[in-house]
Amino acid sequence: MGPHPAVAAIRLAVRRVLHDILTEQPPAHDTRRTPARGAARPCAPDPERVPAPGTRRSVAAPARAAHDQAHASSRPRPGEDVPPAPLVLVACSGGADSMALASALAFEAPKLGIRAGGITVDHGLQPGSDLRADEVVLRLTELGLSPAESIAVTVGRDGGPEAAARDARYAALDSAAERHGATAILLGHTRDDQAETVLLGLARGSGIRSLSGMAAVSGADGRYRRPFLHLDRQTARKACMVQSLPVWDDPHNADPAYTRSRLRHEGLPALEKALGKGVVEALARTAQLSRDDADALDAWASQAEASVRDAAGLLECAKLYALPPAVRRRILRRAAIEAGAPAGSLFARHIEEIDRLITGWRGQGAINLPGKVVAQRQGGRLVIRQG
C-alpha cells in the first residue's frame, strides 16, 4: 500500500524539482565548468523512469542506473577528489506548507544523492520567536536534515511590515545559501498563495508582470524553487496530519492588520461566495498565462531596444513611437533602471509619464523619477540620466 494521496502529491512535486536541479548541473567531474560555490554536480536520472506515486519500486535504482550509463566512461579516476553531493535547503517557518515541504525533501533527496538541509528565519516580531525558531530547528533535525539552523534578522520599515519582513527573510536565506554552498532553496508557497499574490497585484493596478504572481524558479541562478505552486494549501496540511508532523499556525496569518491576511480570510471567501468555487484555481491559471505573456513581451523588448537607439546609444523618439505600447514601456522602464532608478520604487505612473514624452509631446519639461533620475526629450531623443 502506497502513501496517503496528499503525501504522494507533495513528494512527487519535490521529486520533480530535484530532478530539474540535477538536470541543470554539469557532472561533478566535468573540468570544463567549475561547480558554483563548491557544490557537486551529479547528473540527473531520466524523469520518465521515476515510478508513479504509491508504487513500491524505488527511484534510487533507476537514478543510479541513468547516472552510470550516461557517464560510465568519464567517472573520476582513482585518487581524484570527489566533490560532495549538491545541497538543497528548505526554508521552513514551522507552518503546514513548509513542514510538508521539509518532510518531502528529507524523503526524496537521499534517493537522488542530494544532501538536504533546512533554514528557519526568526523575524523577532513576536514574543518567544527565538524559542519557536529553536523548535523548528529541532523538527528539521528529527527529519534528518543537515545543516538545520535558525537565523535571526532585524526587520526594517521600508515598504511596510510585510515587505520589510520579506526583504529581511530573503537576505538571510541568500546569506545561508552562500555560506553553505547550497545549489537551491525550496519555498513552500502553494496555489492559494499564488492566487492571493495575483489579487494583490490587481488591487495595486499593476501590470501583467505583477499579475503573473510568483515564479516556480526565481532568484540569482534560479536559486529559489517553489514545488507547491500547483498544490492547494489543504493538501500540504493533510500531508502533515497523516504523517503526525507538528505544525505552527503563525498568528500574523490571521491578523487583520495585514493585507494578505484580510485577503485570505475575507476577500477570497467573498469572491468564492459570489463567483462559486474554483476562484483560486482560476487565479493561479491566470498567473501562469500572464507570466508566459510577460516573458514573451520582455524578450521582444530586449530584441527591439537596439533598433531604437542611435549611434550614440540614445533612444530615438520616432522609433519608440512606432513600437507597441507594451514593448515601448518595457524599454523605457529598463532604461530608467539602468540610469539608477530603484526598480522597487519605479511604478507604472512613472513609466506613463515618460511615455507621454514619446506619445504626447507638447514641449513639457523633464520628468523626475526615483533615485534622482531625470527623463527629458531633447532634439528627438529621449535622455534618461542622473539629475
Image (cartoon, rainbow, N blue to C red):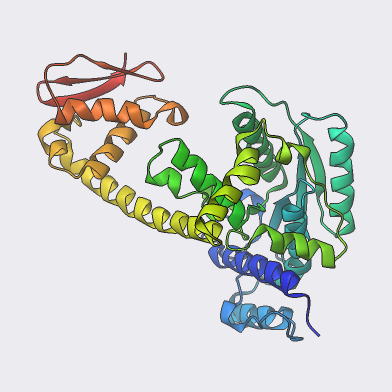
Which residue is pictured at 38% across the width and 46% down the height? 208
* Residue sitting nearer the eye, 256 or 65: 256
Image-based side of 98 in relation to 333, left or right: right
Can the viewer see residue 245 in this picture? yes
Image-based side of 303 in relation to 169, left or right: left
Q: Position of residue 253 (x, y in %)?
A: 71, 41
Which residue is pictured at 30% across the width and 32% down the height? 335
Which quarter of the figure is the C terminus placed in?
top left
Which residue is pictured at 45% across the width and 50% down the height? 212
Which residue is pictured at 60% across the width and 72% down the height? 44
Image-based side of 165 in relation to 70, left or right: right
Q: Position of residue 233 (x, y in %)?
A: 68, 57
121 to 40, vertically: above or below: above
- The number of callouts visible is 0
Can the viewer see residue 85 in this picture? no
Which corner quadrant of the image does residue 56 belong to?
bottom right
* Residue sitting nearer the eye, 370 or 77: 370
Q: Position of residue 297 (x, y in %)?
A: 30, 50
* Residue sitting nearer the eye, 144 or 326: 326
Which quarter of the figure is the N terminus placed in?
bottom right
Q: Position of residue 198 (x, y in %)?
A: 49, 47
Which corner quadrant of the image does residue 353 belong to?
top left
